[in-house]
Amino acid sequence: MQCGWQDSTEGKIKLYHKEHKEHKRFIHTFVNFVVFVVKIGAMNHLTTYLIISAILFILGLLAMMTRKNGVSVLMGVELILNAAGLNFVAFSRFNGGNLNGQAAALFIMIIAAAEAAVALAIFLNLYRLQATAEVDKASLMKG
């Protein structure tokens, strides 16, 4: 990994990280893809929703598998839950327009909020005891 200082266009000095720039480029490309899909009117097809949901799921899975920080792993779980909620809403919209998918997505959001609260409490306790938020150190909390 390469770190250093870089002058920005506003004259401020900010720390940059080579890996951070690559993630930023990927996110920028993904946002441009979503904007393109919306502009061409492809949001009227179920396949578009499923592709976006699959991308969210894969990003969440990668975040869960590659990160050591507990908060980053939690963000990966949230992405996976949002992908599942998007699938429920998409199938609901294209299968008669009933509200079953929206109800399931609302239930997923409630469960995700509760899961985030419990997980953050566990991570705060881990940080208090071990002075780290790494998931690998969580096995040291055995009683």
Image: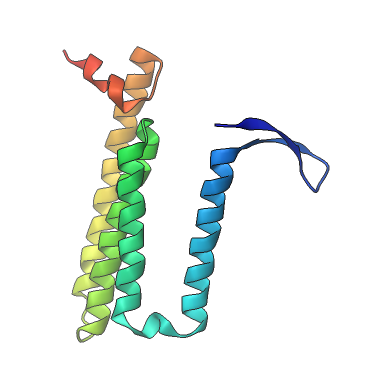
* Number of numbered callouts drawn: 0
Q: Split into 4 quadrants, where in the image is the C terminus?
A: top left
Q: Nearer the viewer, residue 1 or 130?
A: 1
Q: Is residue 4 above or below residue 106?
A: above
Q: Is residue 70 left or right of residue 9?
A: left
Residue under the image location 26 percent in, 22 percent down: 138
- Where is residue 108, by image quadrant? bottom left
Look at the image and name its color scheme.
Answer: rainbow
Q: Is residue 51 above or below residue 55?
A: below
Q: Is residue 42 visible?
A: yes
Residue under the image location 30 percent in, 48 percent down: 61
- Where is residue 105, by image quadrant? bottom left
Q: Is residue 12 above or below residue 3?
A: below
Q: Split into 4 quadrants, where in the image is the N terminus?
A: top right
Q: Nearer the viewer, residue 92 or 63?
A: 63
> Where does the image place residue 99, in percent across and percent down from the top left?
22, 76
Q: Is residue 139 left or right of residue 26?
A: left
Residue under the image location 23 percent in, 76 percent down: 91
Q: Is residue 2 left or right of residue 72?
A: right
Q: Going by the picture, which residue comes out furthest to the right?
A: 11
